[in-house]
C-alpha cells in the first residue's frame, strides 16, 4: 500500500496516485546522526528537504524536487516506560507495527484512526484521527517528540522542554523540521465491544447528540443517493473476547468492503447511471453485528479500494446542519456518488494546527473512487464545509490557503512565528506549505 519509486526515473507517487514528485536525490538514513548530516548537506547544496512516510496523504504535503528522506530504517520501539506509561518509537515506524508490538507488551494507544498503514510521524504530522467523545487524535496522545531542525540540530520537546515547539510540532505538517522519534501515552491493553448496525439518515441526524453522548466512540457512514447509514459504536468492555469469526470477517471486511466494493466502484465508474442502485444495495449489504476485541482490531480495518478524499472538521454543534446541506446538495444535483460519507468526532485539544484545536469537532469525509472525476463534488462539498468555518485535514484534498487558515485557526500566527524562528531559510518548504502557511 505504500508509495513506491517507479523504475529508474526516481518518480515518487502517493498511495492514491494523484501526487507525483521527482526529487534530485533520496536518502534513507540509518540513524538520527545520518539524518542530521543529510539535512545539513541539503542546506549547503541549496536543496529543499522533505521526509515521506507511506504516501497516504492526498495532498502534496511530502512532495519535493529536492532531497527526499525515507525513514524506513528509523523504525522500532526505543523505550517502554511502564512507570510513566509511555512508549517512545522511531518516527518511521508504521502504526501497524506499533500496535502489534504494544499488544504483545499488554499495552495500547487510547484511540486510533481507521487504517494503520501510515508511519507514526506521517500520521501525527497531518492530524490523523479516529473518533472519540473524550479521546482525541493520535497527535493528542503525544507526550514528547524529537525533531531535527533546519540547522541539523536535534531538539527534544515536551510540555516541560521547549513547550512552545511541543504546542505546535505535534501537528507540524513537516514545516518545523523532521521528526525522528515520538513518545506516546499508552495504557494497559483493554477490550472494546463494537456494535455495528444500519440506521436511517433521518434517525442518526436527529439523535446524533444522544448517540455521541452515550458512546465512547461513535461514527457512521452515509450512502449518498439513499436515506441509509451504517453506524458503529465502540465502548470499553469487561469481556470476554468475542472476535469476528474468520468466515464472517472475511465476508464483511474483505469480500463486501473490499472485493465486491471494488467491483461496484468499477461498474459505477464505467456506467455512472447505475450508482444510485448500487448505493441502495451497498447500504443494505452489511448486516448488524457485535464483537469484542483488543483496540486495534476494532478501530482499524483494511482499505484496499483506492480513492481520493476530502475531509473537513466543523464545530461539533454544526455537524447535523452540515450533513443535511450536503445531502440536499447531492439530491438536487446530477452527480453520482458511489462512496459513502464518513462522520466522526473529536474533543477539543491544545495543539496549534490540530483540526480540533480549541473546539469540539466533527469530521465529514467525502470520497471518490480513484480515476473518477471528483472536482465538482468536492468543490460543492467544500463550499458547505467552509460556510461552517470548517478546517480541512492537512493530508486530504482541499483548496484553502494561508489567508483562510489565519481566520479559522486562532493560533495560526503562533505557528508561523515559530516556523520563522526554526526554519528562517525555508529548508522544509514546498509548494503545498507555501500555499497553506504563506511564503
Image: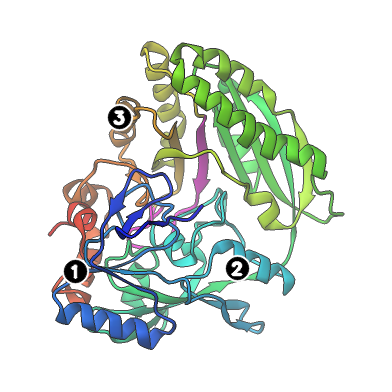
Residue underneath mark 3? 375
**283 left or right, relative to 424:** right
Label drawn at residue 417: 1
Q: Distance between the residues labelled 3 and 1?
A: 33 Å
SS state under label 3: helix
Query: Residue 95 sits in which quadrant?
Result: bottom right
- Magenta residues? 340-358
The count of marks equals 3
SS state under label 1: helix
The earlier-in-sequence mark between 2 and 3 is 2
Label drawn at residue 220: none
Residue underneath mark 2? 98
Residue shown at 62% from the left, 23% from the top: 283
Q: Is residue 170 above or below residue 261?
A: below
Query: Disc 2 or disc 1, which is closer to the eye?
Result: 2
Query: Disc 3 or disc 1, which is closer to the eye?
Result: 3
Return the residue nearer the eye: 311 or 387: 311
Q: How far apart are marks 2 and 1 (CA)?
A: 33 Å
- Whether label 2 touches label 3, CB < 8 Å: no
- Whether label 2 touches label 1, CB < 8 Å: no
> Residue 216 appears at what percent x and percent y?
64, 49
> Residue 189 appears at what percent x and percent y?
73, 66
**114 left or right, relative to 55:** right
Q: In this view, does 345 lie above or below 413?
A: above
Residue 111, magenta (yes or no): no
Amino acid at each position: 500500500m505504500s508509495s513506491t519509486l517507479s523504475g529508474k526515473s526516481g518518480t515518487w507517487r502517493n498511495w492514491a496516485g494523484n501526487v507525483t514528485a521527482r526529487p534530485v536525490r533520496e536518502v534513507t538514513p540509518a540513524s538520527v546522526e545520518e539524518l542530521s548530516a543529510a539535512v545539513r548537506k541539503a542546506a549547503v547544496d541549496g536543496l529543499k528537504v522533505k521526509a515521506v512516510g507511506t504516501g497516504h496523504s492526498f495532498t502534496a504535503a511530502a512532495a519535493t524536487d529536492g532531497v527526499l528522506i525515507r525513514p524506513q530504517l528509523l523504525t522500532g520501539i526505543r523505550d517502554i516506560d511502564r512507570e510513566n506509561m509511555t512508549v517512545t518509537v522511531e518516527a518511521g515506524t508504521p502504526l501497524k507495527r506499533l500496535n502489534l508490538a504494544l499488544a504483545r507488551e499488554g499495552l495500547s494507544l487510547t484511540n486510533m484512526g481507521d487504517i494503520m498503514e501510515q508511519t507514526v510521524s506521517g500520521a501525527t504530522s497531518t492530524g490523523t484521527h479516529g473518533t472519540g467523545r473524550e479521546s482525541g487524535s493520535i497527535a493528542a496522545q503525544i507526550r514528547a517528540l524529537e525533531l531535527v531542525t533546519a540547522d541539523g540540530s536535534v531538539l527534544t520537546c515536551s510540555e516541560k522542554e521547549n513547550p512552545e515547539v511541543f504546542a505546535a510540532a505535534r501537528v507540524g505538517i513537516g514545516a518545523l523540521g523532521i521528526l525522528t522519534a515520538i513518545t506516546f501515552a499508552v495504557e494497559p491493553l483493554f477490550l472494546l465491544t463494537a456494535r455495528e448496525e444500519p440506521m436511517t439518515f433521518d434517525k442518526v441526524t436527529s439523535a446524533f447528540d444522544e448517540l455521541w453522548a452515550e458512546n465512547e466512540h461513535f461514527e457512521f457512514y452515509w450512502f449518498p443517493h439513499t436515506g441509509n447509514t451504517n453506524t458503529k459504536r465502540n465502548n470499553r468492555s469487561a469481556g470476554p473476547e468475542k472476535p469476528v469469526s474468520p468466515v464472517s470477517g472475511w465476508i464483511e471486511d474483505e469480500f463486501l468492503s473490499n472485493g465486491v466494493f471494488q467491483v461496484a466502484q468499477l461498474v459505477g465508474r464505467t456506467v455512472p447511471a447505475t450508482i444510485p442502485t448500487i448505493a441502495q444495495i451497498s447500504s443494505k449489504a452489511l448486516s448488524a453485528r457485535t464483537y469484542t476485541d483488543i483496540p486495534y482490531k476494532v478501530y482499524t480495518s483494511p482499505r484496499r479500494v483506492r480513492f481520493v478524499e476530502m475531509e473537513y472538521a466543523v464545530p461539533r454543534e454544526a455537524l447535523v446542519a452540515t450533513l443535511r446541506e450536503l445531502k440536499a446538495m447531492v439530491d438536487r444535483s446530477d452527480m453520482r456518488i458511489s462512496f459513502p460519507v464518513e462522520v466522526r468526532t473529536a474533543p477539543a485539544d491544545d495543539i496549534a494546527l490540530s483540526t480540533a484545536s480549541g473546539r469540539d469537532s466533527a469530521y465529514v469525509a467525502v470520497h471518490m473512487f480513484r480515476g473518477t472525476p471528483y472536482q465538482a463534488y468536492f468543490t460543492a462539498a467544500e463550499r458547505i464545509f467552509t460556510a461552517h468555518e470548517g478546517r480541512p485535514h492537512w493530508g486530504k484534498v482541499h483548496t484553502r490557503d494561508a489567508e483562510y487558515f489565519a481566520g479559522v485557526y486562532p493560533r495560526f500566527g503562533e505557528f508561523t512565528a515559530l516556523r520563522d524562528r526554526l526554519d528562517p531559510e525555508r529548508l522544509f518548504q514546498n509548494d503545498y506549505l507555501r500555499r497553506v502557511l504563506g511564503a
